[in-house]
Image (tube, grey):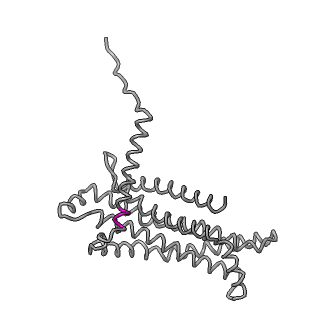
């Protein structure tokens, strides 16, 4: 009499949750280690680290800066024109510029800059770290007495933070300037009203939330792809898997941060 093979019971939800929590805690620990190294003076004493940081900061910022600035300028002109024409048709012209500044400077530009840097720089850098780790490059560096986290991971993280903040800051300046020119033209007559509107929008609490959101965006797009690349283990570990994992986790964190900033600004 033949017996059918016994089926293995499905894993319990509690075990899966525990495994997920352990993996998340491991990633958080690695992120904390990189953050501590970034704030440690001894990390900056490595000449190779400083050289790698300068190289990555240039390569991650300079090539995408003109294109993103042009994109921000076009977005500003289009949105400003749409909002101004719509506000005039409803007799709400006095609120048009305030709406443009709130939508562009407070919300769209920081999020767009973070996504732009992530897709062009930090996610490919995280995938490159995963490939180097899988090929044994980090073990070879450790055998030579070198720290791969300081020389390879830390420069990429700091370069991602620098690129995000640079793109967001420059694009906000371009957006506010073009929004003024689109409404008032090359005249100084509208400057007092424009500065009063800015003071009304950028209250101390809104300014604090804006700065914190930009810093957290830059940290998210810089840390999460690198941590995903360094934590690749198991049979499915690959460059593509690291890039996909980094993208999904980073996008979820960005949405969470954006939601929290909206709650802080408007509720």
Residue 35 included in the magenta stretch of the image: yes
Q: Nearer the viewer, residue 97 or 237?
A: 97
Span colored in magenta: 34-38
Horizontal and vertical percent for residue 18?
A: 40, 40
Q: Residue at (42%, 66%) from the top-left corner?
A: 121
Q: Quadrant of the C terminus?
A: bottom right
Q: Quadrant of the N terminus?
A: top left
Quadrant assignment, res 178: bottom right
Residue 140 included in the magenta stretch of the image: no
Q: Residue at (51%, 54%) from the top-left corner?
A: 252
160 horizontally vs 198: left or right: left
67 horizontally vs 135: left or right: right
Horizontal and vertical percent for residue 80?
A: 68, 73
Horizontal and vertical percent for residue 155?
A: 34, 69
Give the answer, above or below, for where 80 lies relative to 236: below
Dominant secondary structure (helix, strand or loop) of the stretch shown in magenta: helix
Horizontal and vertical percent for residue 163?
A: 45, 71
**Extreme-top residue of the structure:** 1
Q: Residue at (82%, 71%) from the top-left corner?
A: 91
């Amino acid at each position: 009499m033949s017996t059918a093979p016994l089926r293995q019971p499905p894993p319990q939800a509690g075990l899966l949750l525990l495994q997920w929590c352990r993996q998340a805690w491991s990633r958080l620990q690695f992120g904390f280690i990189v953050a501590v190294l970034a704030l440690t003076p001894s990390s900056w004493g490595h000449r190779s680290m400083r050289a790698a940081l300068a190289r990555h900061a240039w390569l991650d910022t300079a090539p995408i800066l003109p294109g993103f600035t042009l994109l921000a300028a076009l977005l500003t002109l289009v949105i400003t024109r749409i909002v101004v024409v719509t506000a005039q048709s409803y007799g709400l012209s006095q609120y048009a510029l305030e709406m443009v500044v709130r939508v562009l400077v407070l919300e769209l530009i920081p999020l767009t800059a973070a996504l732009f840097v992530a897709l062009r720089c930090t996610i490919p850098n995280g995938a490159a770290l995963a490939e180097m780790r899988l090929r044994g490059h980090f073990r070879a560096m450790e055998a030579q007495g070198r720290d791969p986290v300081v020389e390879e991971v830390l420069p990429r993280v700091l370069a991602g933070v620098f690129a995000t903040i640079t793109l967001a800051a420059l694009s906000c300046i371009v957006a506010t300037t073009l929004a003024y020119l689109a409404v008032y033209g090359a005249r100084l007559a509208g400057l007092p009203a424009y500065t009063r509107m800015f003071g009304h929008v950028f209250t101390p609490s809104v300014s604090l939330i804006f700065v914190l959101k930009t810093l957290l965006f830059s940290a998210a797009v810089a840390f999460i792809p690198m941590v995903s690349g360094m934590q690749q283990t198991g049979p499915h570990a690959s460059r593509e898997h690291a890039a996909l994992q980094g993208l999904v986790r980073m996008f979820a964190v960005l949405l969470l941060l954006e939601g929290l900033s909206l709650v802080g600004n408007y509720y």
